[in-house]
Image: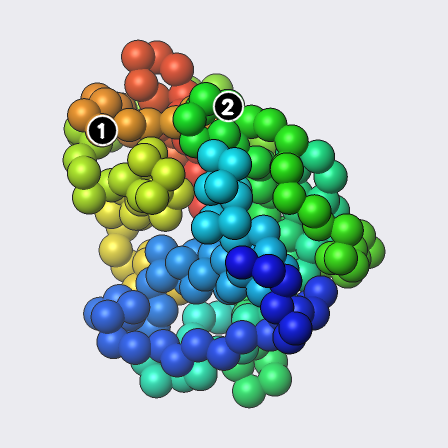
Amino acid sequence: MPISPNFTSILSKDWEINFTQCAPNGFLKYTDLCNILQLTAAAHSEIGGISFTDMQEFDQAWVLSRMRVEISKLPKWGDTVTVKTWINSLENSRSVRALEMHVNGEKIVGSETFWAVFNTKRRRPEGLVLPFEHFELYPEKRATIDGFSKINFNNEKEIVFEKNVFLSDLDIVNHVNNVKYLEWCLDLVDEKLILNQAVKSFEMNFLKELSLKDKVIIHENISENKTVFSITKEDKTSFALQLNWE
């Protein structure tokens, strides 16, 4: 698609929280929070001419490599949230994108995301083919207090679950959808912590692809105010999640 005449380097988009996106406490699920953030990023790439459809002409797609989310509170069923997004950096095969969620003018969520250009046929990163110079970059305009980091998952840990990858876990790029990793891990957390909104921030590192019928092991390490999950296939780590509790 060509660059939209309505293109702007900072996009604001409204979303209404519906009941299918909410946990039993009536507040937005953490997984659906991530979905809304990513859908806003996708909407910005569409009006800027670097969407999935545009990139697939060259067998390319954006894939998420790291993500940090900081939460002061979650929106509830019926709320209309405004998500703002802009790009901190964009060069060659990598991009850092910022996102904020607001309710009634109050910022309640900030997120920093790191994306890589991925060749969906060669299954490897490569430089972005499409032009992107029309995006104004905002390297100093941060959405989070802390930036994303490399999660330390090499501490003593225990196996808490084993599973196979099913078709419902895959996305349009034909690998496990990034939100699925989060969902698998959150299903293993004490539900009281989730329902009481005890998560104040979380980080995700996406390290290796997982595909249909892969067999994986989920590991957990719990320490004071922090839980780290890692997901391995054949002793190689594919994903790491760090949850920071209140």
Q: Dot 2, crowdedness within 10 Å: few (<14), some or many (≥20)?
A: few
Dividing the picture into quadrants, the one containing residue 165 is: top left
Lateral position of residue 213 relative to residue 201, left or right:
left
Residue displayed at 25% across by 76% down? 19
Lateral position of residue 5 relative to residue 37, left or right:
right
Residue annotated with mark 2:
124
Using the image, determine if residue 48 lies above or below residue 121: below
Q: Dot 1, crowdedness within 10 Å: few (<14), some or many (≥20)?
A: some
Q: Position of residue 159 (x, y in %)?
A: 26, 24
Q: What amino acid type should be assigned to the residue bearing mark 2?
A: Arg
Marks 1, 2: nearer the viewer? 2
Labels in figure, total: 2
Residue displayed at 32% across by 35% down? 174
Residue closest to the eye, 82 or 56:
56
Q: What amino acid type should be assigned to the residue bearing mark 1?
A: Leu
Residue closest to the eye, 198 or 162:
162
